[in-house]
């Protein structure tokens, strides 16, 4: 009987020590990639004061913008030239592999597309240049579309 009682007490002590040493679990720390993807959700607006559009396009050619974790889409007169693009979010949280969808048959992309997010993750900038394929048309030149997070 004495052995059974000692074994029971020892078992209870071992269970208590095990439970006590576990403590509270630490909250999971989000990766830079997860933080960037989270920051991209929400409402974004075009910053017309900082946005530069190609020739022949009015400052208000972009009426709305939608941003996801894989790209963006544009609405308004801008869609005669470009209607959106894509990017990937690297493990570091940086935006990479930028591309745009040129909708005008008279224009071609000239060089690379850069997509960047500021350190506060509140301003997304997409920059690219187009050239005319055959004739002079609206929308050629340098573009820098700046979008700021509203919420």
Image (spheres, rainbow, N blue to C red):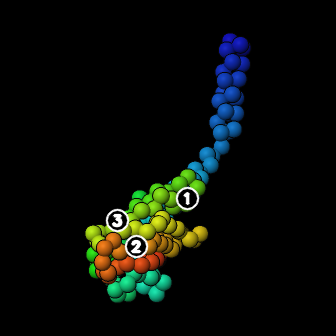
| Residue 108 in which image quadrant | bottom left
* Quadrant assignment, res 85: bottom left
> Furthest-front residue in view?
134
**Relative image position of residue 141 (x, y in whole percent):** 42, 78
* Residue named by callout 2: 130
Q: Give how far apart the Cα atoms at labels 3 and 1 are.
A: 23 Å
> Which comes sooner in the sequence, label 3 or label 2?
3
Residue at (66% x, 24% y) in the render: 11
Query: Which mark is first along the chain, 1 or 3?
Result: 1
Q: Which mark is nearer the camera, 3 or 2?
A: 2
Q: Label 3: which residue?
A: 101
Please indicate, yes or no, whether residue 147 appears anywhere in the rendered image: no
Viewport quadrant of the N terminus: top right
The label nearer to you, 3 versus 1, is: 3
Nearest the camera: 4 or 148?
148
**For residue 128, side relative to residue 135 (left or right):** right
Q: Quadrant of the C terminus?
A: bottom left
Q: Residue at x 40, y 73 (%)?
A: 130
Q: Please report the residue visible at 63 percent of the width from the left and 46 percent of the height from the top.
A: 24
Does dot 2 land on a helix, a strand or a loop? strand
- Crowding near the residue tagged with mark 2, few <14, some 14–19, many ≥20 C-alpha atoms within 10 Å: some
Residue 125 vs 86, above or below: the answer is below
- Report whether 11 appears left or right of 50: right
> From the viewer's perspective, is residue 34 above or below residue 60?
above
- Residue 100 appears at what percent x and percent y? 39, 65
Question: For this view, does 68 lie left or right of residue 94?
Answer: left
List the residue tagged with mark 1.
93
**Residue 149, position as x, y percentages in the image:** 46, 74
Question: Looking at the image, is 19 positioned above or below residue 76?
Answer: above
């Amino acid at each position: 009987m004495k052995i059974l009682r000692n074994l029971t007490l020892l078992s209870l002590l071992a269970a208590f020590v095990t439970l006590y040493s576990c403590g509270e679990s630490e909250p999971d720390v989000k990766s830079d990639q997860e933080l960037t993807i989270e920051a991209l959700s929400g409402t974004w607006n075009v910053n017309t004061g900082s946005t530069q559009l190609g020739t022949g396009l009015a400052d208000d050619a972009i009426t709305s913008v939608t941003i996801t974790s894989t790209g963006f889409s544009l609405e308004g007169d801008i869609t005669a030239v470009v209607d959106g693009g894509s990017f990937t979010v690297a493990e570091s949280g940086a935006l990479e592999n930028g591309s745009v969808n040129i909708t005008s048959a008279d224009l071609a992309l000239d060089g690379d597309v850069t997509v960047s997010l500021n350190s506060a993750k509140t301003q997304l900038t997409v920059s690219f240049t187009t050239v005319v394929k055959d004739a002079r048309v609206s929308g050629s030149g340098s573009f820098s579309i700046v979008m700021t997070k509203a919420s």
